């Protein structure tokens, strides 16, 4: 039964790009909900959008419908999605006049971009670079928990949004540094430094 459902999905008109664009749209919705301080709904949209992001590549490989442009689109949208949700969190912190949290959000955005960039650049040099603490899945989990348990979400008399952002700022920065050191060591070992 499971194989039949899988084959029907593969035979359908569903494309990996449609899944990627759905994830993108849901993350835009999540950002809007966060700015509106509807954190539980924002967390749900973020979780579902992030799940779509996780599935598009798997579906691409499973169905054989993937294209080089689709891989490029997926990777590009992943960066934009994470950035737009973090910017929405930054807007929320700015509305609360929490300058430290705004600064941490900016560091988290830059760190997140650097984690992705260092991997892409390393792979362009022929070095596999999946090292580090803050790869995408842990970042999604940390941010999702932070959004779900933000002040005003009604899920307790506490907020995990600022601590989640502080953790992301630290972990993404550390991961970017880990990747730089990893690539340097690999290139040095291969005589490329």
Image (spheres, helix red, strand yellow):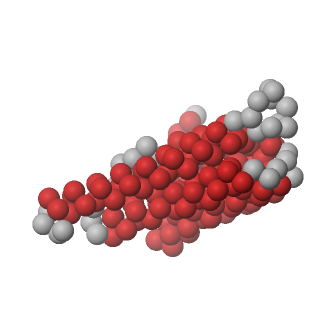
Residue in the image at 39% along x and 47% along y: 132
Can residue 97 be seen here?
yes
147 left or right of 68? Answer: right
Name the spot of residue 5 as percent of width and height, x first: 60, 42
Give the number of marks.
0
175 left or right of 129? Answer: right
Can residue 128 be seen here?
no
Residue that lies at the very extreme toward the top in this rendered image: 156
Residue in the image at 82% along x and 50% along y: 96
Name the spot of residue 97 as percent of width and height, x first: 80, 53
Of residue 160 and residue 16, the one placed in the foreground of this image is 160
- Specify the quadrant of the image occupied by residue 121: bottom left
Residue in the image at 75% along x and 50% along y: 98
180 left or right of 3? Answer: left
- Quadrant including the N terminus: top right
Residue in the image at 43% along x and 43% along y: 133
Of residue 113 and residue 77, the one placed in the foreground of this image is 113
- Quadrant including the C terminus: bottom left
Using the image, determine if residue 171 lies above or below residue 20: above
Name the spot of residue 91 as percent of width and height, x first: 77, 58
156 left or right of 165? Answer: right
């Amino acid at each position: 039964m499971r194989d039949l459902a899988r084959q029907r999905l593969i035979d359908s008109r569903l494309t990996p790009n449609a899944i990627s664009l759905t994830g993108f749209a849901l993350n835009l919705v999540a950002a809007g909900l966060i700015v509106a301080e509807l954190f539980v709904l924002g967390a749900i949209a973020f979780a579902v959008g992030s799940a779509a992001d996780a599935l598009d590549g798997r579906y691409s490989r499973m169905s054989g419908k993937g294209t080089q442009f689709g891989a490029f689109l997926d990777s590009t949208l992943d960066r934009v999605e994470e950035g737009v949700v973090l910017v929405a969190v930054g807007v929320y912190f700015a509305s609360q006049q929490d300058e430290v949290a705004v600064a941490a959000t900016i560091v988290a955005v830059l760190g997140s971009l650097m984690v992705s960039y260092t991997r892409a650049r390393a792979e362009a040099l022929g070095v596999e670079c999946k090292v580090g603490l803050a790869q995408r899945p842990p970042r999604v989990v940390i941010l999702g928990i932070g959004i779900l348990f933000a002040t005003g979400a009604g899920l307790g008399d506490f907020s995990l949004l600022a601590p989640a952002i502080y953790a992301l700022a630290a972990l993404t920065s550390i991961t970017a540094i880990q990747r730089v050191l990893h690539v340097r060591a690999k290139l040095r070992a291969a005589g490329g430094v």
